Amino acid sequence: MTESFKYDGNMGKAGELHQPASDTHPTMTTAQGCPISDDQNSLKAGSRGPVLMEDHVLREKLFHFDHERIPERVVHARGYGAHGYFEAYESLADITSADIFQRKGEKTPVFTRFSTVAGNKGSPDLARDVRGFAVKFYTQEGNWDLVGNNIPVFFIQDAMKFPDLIHSAKAEPDRGFPQAQTAHDNFWDFISLSPEAMHMVMWIMSDRAIPRSLRFMEGFGVHTFKLINAKGDEKFVKFHWKPKAGMQSVVWNEALKINGADPDFHRRDMWQAIQEGDYPEWELGLQIFDQQFADEFEFDVFDATKLIPEEQVPVKIVGRMVLDRVVDNFFAETEQVAFCTQNIVPGIDFTPDPLLQGRNFSYLDTQVKRLGGPNFTHIPVNAPKCPMRHFQQDGHMAMQNPKGRVNYEPNSWEGSEHNPRACPVNGYQSSSQSLGADKLRYRSETFADHYSQAQQFYKSQSDVEQMHMQSALVFELSKVETLAIRERLVSHLLNIDKTLAQKVADGLGLKKMPKAAEAAMKTREDLPVSAALSMLKNAPNTFKGRKLGILVSDGVDDKIFKSVTDALKKEGAYYEVIAADVGGATSADGKLIPAQQVINGGPSVLYDAVLVLVSEKGAKYFSKVPEAKDFVNDAHAHMKFIGYTVEAKPLFKAASLDDKMDKGWIDLNKSNAESFIKSLRALRYWQR
């Protein structure tokens, strides 16, 4: 007779578990600090009687639970954040007085939040979407929020259209779906009636919209800002984040399957990397230019639907951001963090970009609504780490108010730390700008070219990336039920690239090619290809930070397993073992190989490459397991490298892959572990 499992605690009259306080477990209290004697049962009139209203412990517990949720963000609802620091590589005192850029090697605390845009908090990570990339710098002169995206341009030129854009992208209001998807009539109806969005369409239909990891994507400030030095000299600037690990995306079929297998794929990846000590890093780059360049540039630098190619203004790397600490509590930090584009510091200023100007108003307004009042800056994750001195007071949830009798100025009271005054010398100074103009609701003609940079982006992609964009457009538009909307969008594509338009029209089965959309300005044909716009042309050539999925069975060759895992460690890469059951497998030498995944819960879409390391008996077993056949079929279809030993061939035959094995399949009986890992650095075998 086996002994019963012993609970940590005492059993109540009805079998409920009571866990009393002890030397290692402090006494539980109410929010008012009152010690609690029983957290399992409400106060009743008799053992089976009604619950008494005087039960203040129950009432407080339910009251707080009922109020746990705050309004989720209208956009960027699903996000993930981490703490870290920014380290300046050099002093930039010659171009900006911003304190964060004054001293080489100085580290400034940051909090960074990544997000999708359209979906709600419960949507999956791998939706095709823009990714928010927002960084809060806790500088010595206040918080600076660089609130950007993983794409350097945006859909619209004027904030007046932002509500319409988001309404169109969200679930259609009469039916409440689709969730976190733009593949529906409303979105493409709006987009096809907004030529200014065509450049952004090219980006969201590219692989940039389905990143493999938050760690492997670029970030951009999107808008043009100003840098001002101590002398008052001004330069324009665009901000860039460059991932030290390089850029990488998944393919669309893979994204769909990841969303089913692990909707938290990006969150889990970021969490695990930081916990492993593999801290994600990005370098901050600046595109700095003057008024003369702005005047001579082909497009308006205040137009958020345009970028400046790096070949025209190189990106100057000025520092790095390292994320080295996960949050202590997701709600308190990641959910309650409040980014506002208006949060800038001396030495940085806005420009007349109409989208940026609208964001400056909207972001503050939305944080007040979402977090309950104007005192959201009292929440620790939002509070500056430099001294705050002002006469703002009261309001909902005020954590601190001015001390002493004075709460206004000017005043005649004695000077003290509680009686601050404005400082004309060190205080924030806006840049000067002559504004002798009429009030107009007007869109400048300098914003009129909607197709030239869209064409430049498309032509700058590799053949593989162009094919992915074509397929993405066909997928999205095939979900649009209204033929006129599909045709209208294709009419815009004709102004970008005729071959692209034809590929999409063929994919949609259009019987007749529509006429090209009327253009406010003819597409330029003289813009050169920009290699910096392509991900594959800038492949990282490393497997560092990536993950190998190793499918094993009993009887596996332990020497090969050890040589591969040792080589992975040397590369700075990870691996997970997938087996028939979570107990793992026993090698031919009798050693236990622990498993992290079971074959029906660890599909190959979760990995950057796979290794099938099984015995003959194991191969025969897996040949009868549908998920094992999917494991290798998906890896092959998604252009991944597949390592194997000869014993695995019965599985490949069962998966109908035995005659499709190309140079992306690597026989570990003929190749050593180091050569295998070297091959994996290409990340995909695109020749397939």
Image (cartoon, rainbow, N blue to C red):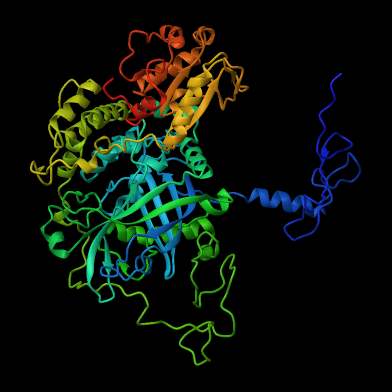
Residue closest to the eye, 679 or 377: 679
Residue 274 sits above or below residue 231 on the image: above
| Residue 220: % across, % down | 32, 51
Residue in the foreground of this view, choosing between 356 and 268: 268
- Can residue 118 be seen in this snapshot? no
Q: Is residue 561 left or right of residue 462?
A: right
Quarter of the image with the C terminus in it: top left
Spot occupied by residue 139 in the image (x, y as percentages of width and height): 43, 66
Residue 206 is at least partly visible in this image = yes
Number of numbered callouts drawn: 0
Relative to 606, is 105 above or below? below
Q: Quadrant of the N terminus?
A: top right
- Residue 490 position by quadrant: top left
Q: Is residue 293 left or right of residue 667?
A: left
**Residue located 61% across and 17% down the image:** 590
Q: Is residue 521 above or below residue 627?
A: below
Please state which of residues 53 and 617 is positioned toward the viewer in this rendering: 617
Q: Residue 131 vs residue 261: left or right? A: left
Task: Report x, y in % for residue 673.
Answer: 41, 25
Q: Return the residue nearer the eye: 464 or 202.
A: 464
Where residue 308 appears, as percent x and y from the top left, is 20, 51
Left or right of 611, for residue 330: right
Residue at the (40%, 44%) spot, across then down: 117
* Residue furthest right in the image: 46
